[in-house]
């Protein structure tokens, strides 16, 4: 099976995992649940749950990790909540996401805020349910460690911290520095990539040193992924990306591309991605699919 076919198969399976964890659209909160599910089922690469599962596979057979699907679903819910809030008029003010109207356009701004809040809370409710299957003290320790990572990387010291720095940078009139820009990318984007890979490794019983190496790998992937996203915002199209292009310029955002230009940005994506692959290839239990997945981020068109 070639990489594209394997990726399609794995992504479709993850879609099935996610659908099994989505809340039923009923009761007094039916509308907000509909808005939550609307955002999650809009599609996407499912990169984060995929990275979580493939990182776990570096250390064990993932079929033995009964807790893994709960955390895969939880992280994807958190990712989607962040997108719902990012699209709001108070943030990026985007009307399209993944080729269709954004949640706030369909359900209204207030309901979109609640949908994001709902996904964040439901993510931790979902992850906590994994503890019901714990059989040993070690199971509990691994799940608790994974839960701590999930909270830290998505919270004020992770993704939200990056979003805060991003908003404050937009309000300042001085030129964005590399240091500030990389802080934003490392927290706003790379933090959830780090959560994915280190949660997978934690649940699989990896050592502290192995988890640290994956965290560095994920940093490279996340920053390279964001720089590539900035590149596509300049060179892509609505038809290919499924969202408006030029939004960074419209919102007066300083990006890696704006500071360094397209050629240097492309070289940096390549350098960081290859460095990440080098880290992965050094693990005794190789995962060729995961290595190729990282490389494909360089050439993605959407």
Image (cartoon, rainbow, N blue to C red):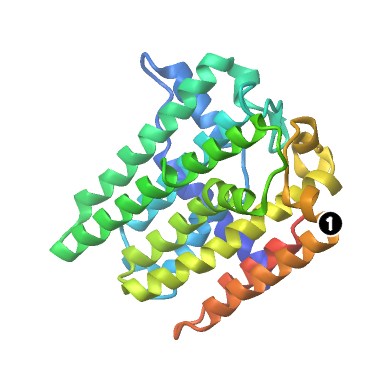
Residue 269: x and y in percent read 71, 64
Q: Is residue 78 left or right of residue 296?
A: left
Residue visible at 24% across and 54% down in the picture: 144
Counting every numbered tag in the picture gives 1
Residue 54: x and y in percent read 49, 67
Residue visible at 83% across and 45% down in the picture: 234
Q: Is residue 157 left or right of residue 218?
A: left
Using the rendered image of the protein, determine whether residue 252 is visible from the camera's viewpoint.
Answer: yes
Using the rendered image of the protein, determine whether residue 244 is visible from the camera's viewpoint.
Answer: no
Is 186 located above or below residue 268 in the figure?
above
Residue 247: x and y in percent read 77, 34
Q: Residue 98: name its quadrant.
A: top right
Label 1 neighbour load within 10 Å: few <14, some 14-19, many 20+:
some
Residue projecting furthest to the front: 174
| SS label for mark 1 | helix
Q: Residue 261: name its quadrant.
A: bottom right
Residue visible at 62% across and 62% down in the picture: 7
Q: Is residue 140 left or right of residue 180?
A: left
Residue visible at 68% across and 61% down in the picture: 297
User: On the rendered image, what quadrant is the N terminus found in?
Assistant: bottom right
Instruction: Return the residue nearer the eye: 173 or 142.
Output: 173
Report which residue position mark 1 lands on. Answer: 262
Residue 104: x and y in percent read 60, 21
């Amino acid at each position: 099976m070639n990489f594209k076919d394997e990726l399609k198969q794995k992504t479709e399976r993850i879609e099935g995992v996610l659908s099994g964890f989505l809340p039923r659209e009923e009761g007094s909160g039916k509308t907000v649940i509909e808005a939550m599910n609307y955002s999650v089922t809009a599609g996407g690469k499912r990169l984060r749950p995929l990275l979580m599962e493939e990182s776990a596979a570096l250390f064990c057979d993932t079929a033995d990790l009964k807790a893994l699907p709960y955390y895969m679903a939880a992280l994807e819910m958190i990712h989607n909540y962040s997108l719902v809030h990012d699209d709001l008029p108070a943030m990026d003010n985007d009307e399209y996401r993944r080729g269709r109207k954004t949640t706030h356009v369909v359900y209204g701004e207030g309901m979109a805020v609640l949908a994001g809040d709902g996904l964040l809370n439901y993510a931790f409710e979902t992850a906590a349910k994994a503890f019901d299957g714990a059989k040993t003290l070690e199971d509990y320790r691994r799940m608790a460690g994974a839960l701590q990572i999930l909270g830290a990387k998505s919270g004020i010291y992770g993704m939200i911290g990056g979003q805060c720095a991003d908003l404050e940078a937009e309000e300042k009139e001085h030129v964005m520095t590399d240091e500030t820009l990389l802080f934003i990318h490392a927290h706003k984007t790379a933090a959830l990539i780090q959560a994915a890979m280190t949660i997978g490794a934690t649940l699989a019983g990896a050592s502290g040193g192995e988890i640290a190496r994956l965290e560095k790998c994920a940093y490279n992937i996340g920053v390279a992924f964001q720089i590539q996203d900035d590149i596509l915002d300049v060179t892509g199209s609505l038809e290919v990306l499924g969202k408006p292009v030029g939004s960074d310029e419209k919102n007066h955002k300083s990006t890696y591309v704006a500071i360094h230009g397209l050629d240097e940005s492309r070289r940096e994506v390549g350098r960081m991605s290859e460095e990440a692959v080098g880290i992965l290839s050094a693990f005794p239990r190789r995962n060729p699919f995961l290595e190729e997945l990282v490389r494909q981020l360089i050439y993605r068109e959407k």
